[in-house]
Image (cartoon, rainbow, N blue to C red):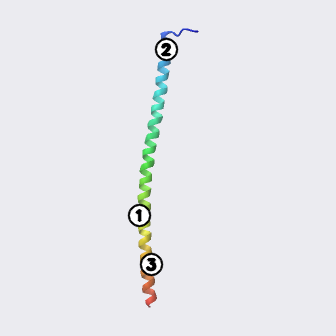
Amino acid sequence: MAELSPETVTELIKEIGKIGSWIQAVGLVIVLWLVFQIIILINNRIKRKQLYIIEERLKNIEKKLDVKLKKR
């Protein structure tokens, strides 16, 4: 079995550290992406809710108009 010199072990540890840094960076990007997706999801839900409220109001207005027009 080959003996590892201290320099080789040091270089190996440095390379593993670099890989760890890349993994952390990718993890940070993924976390930020998830946060933005959650914000977009909440924002879209609020917009949809407002559209449903507007739709219900329009239906009520249409019903009232139909009643008024039938009376004529």
Report crowding for label 1: few under 14, some 14 to 19, many 20 or more residues within 10 A (C-alpha): few
Q: Is residue 2 above or below residue 14?
A: above
Report crowding for label 3: few under 14, some 14 to 19, many 20 or more residues within 10 A (C-alpha): few
Q: Secondary structure at mark 3?
A: helix
Say what amino acid the circle numbered 3 marks.
Answer: Glu
Q: Quadrant of the C terminus?
A: bottom left
Between disc 1 and disc 2, whose residue precedes?
A: 2
Residue ID at (43%, 90%):
71
The x, y position of residue 49, in whole percent, is 42, 62
Report the Cα–Cα distance between label 1 and label 2: 62 Å
Q: Which residue is mark 2?
A: 9
Say what amino acid the circle numbered 1 marks.
Answer: Gln
Contact between labelled residues 3 and 2, with CB atoms less than 8 Å apart: no
Report the Cα–Cα distance between label 3 and label 1: 18 Å
Q: Secondary structure at mark 2?
A: helix
Residue ID at (41%, 50%):
39
Q: Which residue is mark 3?
A: 62
Between disc 3 and disc 1, whose residue precedes?
A: 1
Q: Looking at this rendering, what residue extends furthest in the bottom direction?
A: 72
Report crowding for label 2: few under 14, some 14 to 19, many 20 or more residues within 10 A (C-alpha): few
Report the Cα–Cα distance between label 2 and label 3: 79 Å
Where is residue 68, by image quadrant? bottom left
The foreground one among 45 and 29 is 45
In-image side of 39 versus 3 (left or right):
left
Q: Which residue is mark 1?
A: 50
The foreground one among 2 and 17 is 2
Say what amino acid the circle numbered 2 marks.
Answer: Val
